[in-house]
Image (tube, helix red, strand yellow):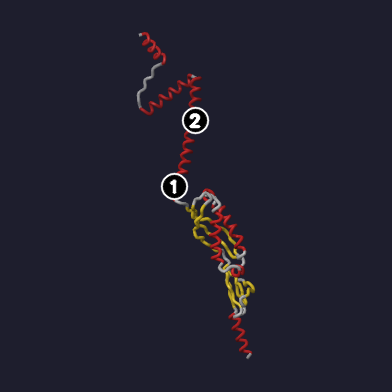
Amino acid sequence: MIAFLLVLALVLVVLGIRIVSQWQKGVVFRLGKYMREIGPGLNLIIPFIEYVRYVDMRIRTMDVVPQEVMTKDSVPVKIDAVVYYKIFDAAKSIIAVENFALASTLLAQSKLRDVLGKYDLDTLLSNKDQMGKEVNDALQGPTDAWGINVVSVEIKNIEIPDNMKRAMAKEAEAIREKRSRLVKASAEEEASRMFTDAAKTIAESPNALVLRQLQTWQEIGAEQNSLIILVPTDFAHAVKEALKKA
């Protein structure tokens, strides 16, 4: 009899052994009622009366289905996002919600549309990080009750219609054209000022005019490889007076 009881006790102990991995937590229920949580390692439960639900406590990745969002300025866009979350309360993730993964996915889709629909297209394209933080904050409240902590929300891609892409390309081209014209006009204005200053300097100094003439002749001779005959100014004046008298 004693041997039978010992064997029975040994069998019950063996059947009650539960091994929990390092990244897991076990939620113990006794006759359907929550009792306790068990941590990593070797644990014992009462067989046939208690059972364990294992919960992975590592960070999980949830790829949100691309959502059609109408922006504040009435532009339809398709937004693709990724949500990173982890469970901080294993018991809540089982007791408070039937399927926390599905519930989190549907909630993320809804909050993505609600939050991003409040902004115009330019804001969405230029502040994706800020948009992700706002979606994260919107998700955090409801998921806390499920024992889930949303680590971050990353906006992967914002797809805009083709006609809007062409319009944006034309706008960017027009802006670049405007900048080039402004730069050219500024250069011409600066060059005109410099020519005016040079003309004043030459008018005030005859020697400056002579030096400029010599420089011009040198440039012409170097570029065109031609023969230049220099006529003295006095001789030119004498010829001009002779032609007038004749």
Disc tally is 2
In-image side of 5 versus 177 (left or right): right
SS for dot 2: helix
Q: Which residue is mark 1?
A: 166
Q: Amino acid at mark 1?
A: Arg
Query: Which one is earlier in the sequence, the residue at label 2 or at label 1?
Result: 1
Instruction: Spot the residue most to the bottom.
Output: 1
Task: Residue 100 in the image: state x and y as whole percent.
Answer: 56, 66
Task: Residue 245 in the image: state x and y as whole percent.
Answer: 37, 8
The residue under the point 48% across, 28% down is 192
Q: Is residue 194 above or below residue 43?
A: above
Q: Nearer the viewer, residue 163 or 10?
A: 163
Q: Amino acid at mark 2?
A: Glu
Question: Is any part of residue 83 visible from this angle?
Answer: no
Task: Residue 119 in the image: state x and y as whole percent.
Answer: 55, 51
Neighbor class of circle 2 (other Cα within 10 Å; few <14, some 14-19, many 20+) is few
SS for dot 1: helix
In three-dimensional space, the C-alpha distance between marks 2 and 1, rounded to whole angstroms, equals: 35 Å
Q: Which residue is mark 2?
A: 189
Instruction: Spot the residue most to the top.
Output: 245
From the viewer's perspective, is the residue at label 2 or at label 1 nearer? 1
Q: Is residue 189 above or below residue 159?
A: above
Label 1 near label 2: C-beta < 8 Å?
A: no
Q: Nearer the viewer, residue 210 or 193?
A: 193
